[in-house]
Image (cartoon, grey):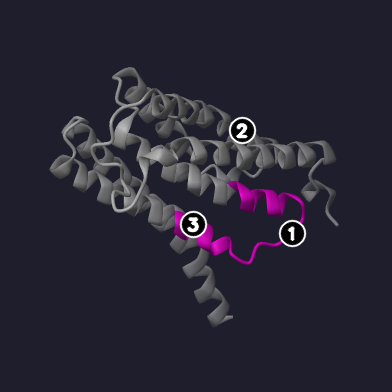
Amino acid sequence: MDKRNVEPFGLKLIMQVYNFAQVCLNVYMIYGLSEVVGVPNIFGINKPYSANLEFFCFVHFLSKALDYFDTIFIILRKKYDQLSVLHVYHHASIGMVWAYLLQIGHANGTASYGAFINSVIHFIMYSHYFIRSIGLENPFKRLVTSAQITQFYSCMLHAVLVPIYDEIIPKKLAILQLCYHTTMIYLFTNFYNQQYKSKGKGKKTS
């Protein structure tokens, strides 16, 4: 075995604790933000602003800073190929998005849907990372990326519905949301095709 490919035990343990902490944090945010979704109003259209939603949107914003440890671990493990345009763009931009919403006082109401669905996806994602960090295989790995892409499509649908039906949040924010998630769908779909479809073709031709 090449010792260069063996992760230090200390780093491995830290990553296990980090991934488990992320799972717990996202469960907490899902619980706190769950009031924004319901049946049939799954997007929280015209949801009144509340101190609770604003607080958990702030927690969600802080969690984006915690997510930077993903990048730190990539560098420490020398997995530089994972520092893709997608990774850098996503981690650099999403924190600024929530900082802007908090600054203008609209990290609330129906905008909380974005924080809620992202917390659900991050719960799935960090559960996968935790499973892998303790040495187990996850047969549903491919579905993690699919879930992320589905999240962005749901956010685009949300952005289309808000200007039509919501009377609280500024319509310009929905337009910005639509543009942002279009870029995310493009980058994540490209990643999905490179990771799975291209590998599948390689296996068939080998």
Q: Nearer the viewer, residue 178 or 196?
A: 178
Q: Residue drawn at (36%, 30%), measured in percent from left and top?
A: 97
- Name above or below for residue 66 compared with residue 132: above
Crowding near the residue tagged with mark 1, few <14, some 14–19, many ≥20 C-alpha atoms within 10 Å:
few
Which of the 4 quarters of the picture holds residue 50?
Answer: top left
Q: Secondary structure at mark 1?
A: loop
Q: Residue drawn at (16%, 43%), measured in percent from left and top?
A: 165
Q: To which residue does mark 1 refer?
A: 136
What's the amino acid at mark 1?
A: Leu
Which is more N-terminal, label 3 or label 2? 2
Which is more N-terminal, label 1 or label 2? 2
Q: To which residue does mark 2 refer?
A: 69
Range covered by the magenta-colored residues: 126-147
What's the amino acid at mark 3?
A: Thr
Q: Position of residue 17 (x, y in %)?
A: 73, 38
Q: Nearer the viewer, residue 168 or 204?
A: 168
